Image: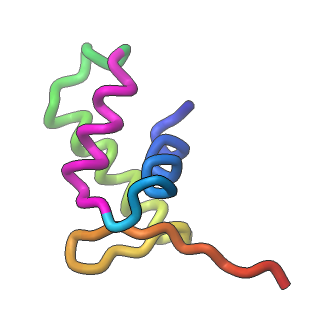
């Protein structure tokens, strides 16, 4: 499971989670990336959050991240 899928899965269960909680959750699941420093991993997850926001998958409101769900037409 890649980081984007991990973020989406976490926000399905915990809507309104802060970026720090999402980063900590991803860091625990992706323990095989131990060769990366904590700052590098934090930057990678933060970038994925911004990319998902740009793709209109996520929404950020005052450091609370939400999953956008559209009704099928």
Please give the name of the residue rendered at 80% of the width and 79% of the height, measured from the top-left corner. Answer: 72
Q: Residue furthest bottom?
A: 73
Q: Main secondary structure of the magenta part?
A: helix
User: Which of the 4 image quarters holds residue 66?
Assistant: bottom left
Verify whether residue 29 appears in magenta: yes
Residue 3 location (% of width, % of height): 46, 39
Verify whether residue 22 appears in magenta: yes
**Would you place residue 73 above or below residue 31 in this image?**
below
From the viewer's side, name the closer residue of 28 and 55: 28
Q: Residue furthest right?
A: 73
Please give the name of the residue rendered at 51% of the width and 57% of the height, measured from the top-left corner. Answer: 12
Quadrant containing the N terminus in the rendered view: top right
Please give the name of the residue rendered at 52% of the width and 47% of the height, measured from the top-left corner. Answer: 9
Q: Is residue 5 left or right of residue 44?
A: right
Residue 47 location (% of width, % of height): 34, 53
Residue 34 location (% of width, % of height): 26, 15
Quadrant containing the C terminus in the rendered view: bottom right
**Would you place residue 72 above or below residue 1 in this image?**
below
Q: Residue furthest front?
A: 13
Q: How many labels, in total?
A: 0
From the viewer's side, name the closer residue of 45 and 68: 68
User: Which of the 4 image quarters holds residue 14?
Assistant: bottom left
**Would you place residue 46 above or below residue 57 in this image?**
above
Residue 48 location (% of width, % of height): 41, 52
**Would you place residue 73 above or below residue 29 in this image?**
below
> How are the residues colored?
rainbow
From the viewer's side, name the closer residue of 25 and 48: 25
Q: Is residue 54 left or right of residue 50?
A: right
Residue interval drawn in magenta:
17-31
Please give the name of the residue rendered at 30% of the width and 48% of the height, measured from the top-left corner. Answer: 22
């Amino acid at each position: 499971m890649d980081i984007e899928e991990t973020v989406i899965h976490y926000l399905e269960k915990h809507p309104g989670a802060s970026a720090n909680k999402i980063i900590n959750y991803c860091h625990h699941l992706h323990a095989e990336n131990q060769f990366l420093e904590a700052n590098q991993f934090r930057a990678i997850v933060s970038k994925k959050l911004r990319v998902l926001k740009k793709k209109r998958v996520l929404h950020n409101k005052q450091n609370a991240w939400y999953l956008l769900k559209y009704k099928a037409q």
